[in-house]
Amino acid sequence: MNPASEYVEASRESSPIHRYVSDNGQGVSKRDIEHVTVAGRQVAVSKDVTDQERTLIKEAIQATRPSEKACFVNALEMWQYNTRFKYVEGFAVMTEFGTGGTAHAWCLLDSEKLVDVTKPFDHYYGVLISEPEILDRYTGSNLTANGILGNHHDRYEFLRERGYMDD
């Protein structure tokens, strides 16, 4: 089983974020991912990414210039660059460290193929957030470094609207 999936299931009751991801997420395992260098940057991508898609990823990296430790911003900027990059938020695991999941954001190209331009992890489990009106709320001049699910600055509005937070 995917260690990120195991982490999310085991920690389901630890927070509304964990519960939402557990209820609505999906996993991507190490066997489906490769760590490669694109545009001079270490990234994680699905093994079935085509050459044409690698070119798009390279162009997006060059245009958005992802920052280390800024996964939410990086993934949102990839979506802004080209909406083929779908925003995903959840948890990722690096097998060698043997720790629990790390809150993280990445993209799914065309809602299917993993693209993580921030830090390549081995396993992922997250929720695709694809509604343009929601993404628009957290981008542009409102670009958030806190993500959408765990955004305490808006009192967890996304989770509150879905019944995952007590008022």
Image: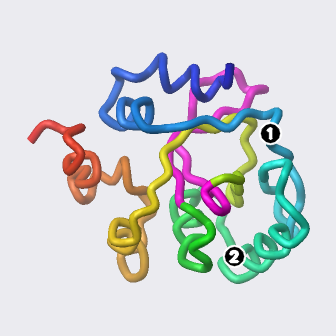
Q: Secondary structure at mark 1?
A: helix
Residue 155 is left or right of residue 22, and the answer is: left
Judge the density around disc 1: few (<14), some (14-19), many (≥20) Cα neighbours within 10 Å.
some
Where residue 158 sits: x, y (%)?
28, 53
Disc 1 to disc 2: CB gap under 8 Å: no
- The magenta span reads 87-111
**Predominant secondary structure in magenta?**
strand
Residue mark closest to the camera, 1 vs 2:
1
Judged from this view, the residue extending furthest toward the left is: 167
Along the viewing direction, whichever of 146 and 13 lies nearer the viewer:
13
**Marking on residue 65:** 2
N-term mark: 1 or 2? 1
Judge the density around disc 2: few (<14), some (14-19), many (≥20) Cα neighbours within 10 Å.
some
| Residue identified by numbered label 1 | 32
Residue 143 higher or lower than 75, as above or below: below
Q: Amino acid at mark 2?
A: Arg
Where residue 15 sits: x, y (%)?
33, 30
Q: Amino acid at mark 1?
A: Asp
Residue 40 within the segment the image draws in magenta: no
Along the viewing direction, whichever of 131 and 30 lies nearer the viewer:
131
Query: What residue is rendered at 53% in x and 59% in y?
Result: 87
The CA span between labels 1 and 2 is 25 Å
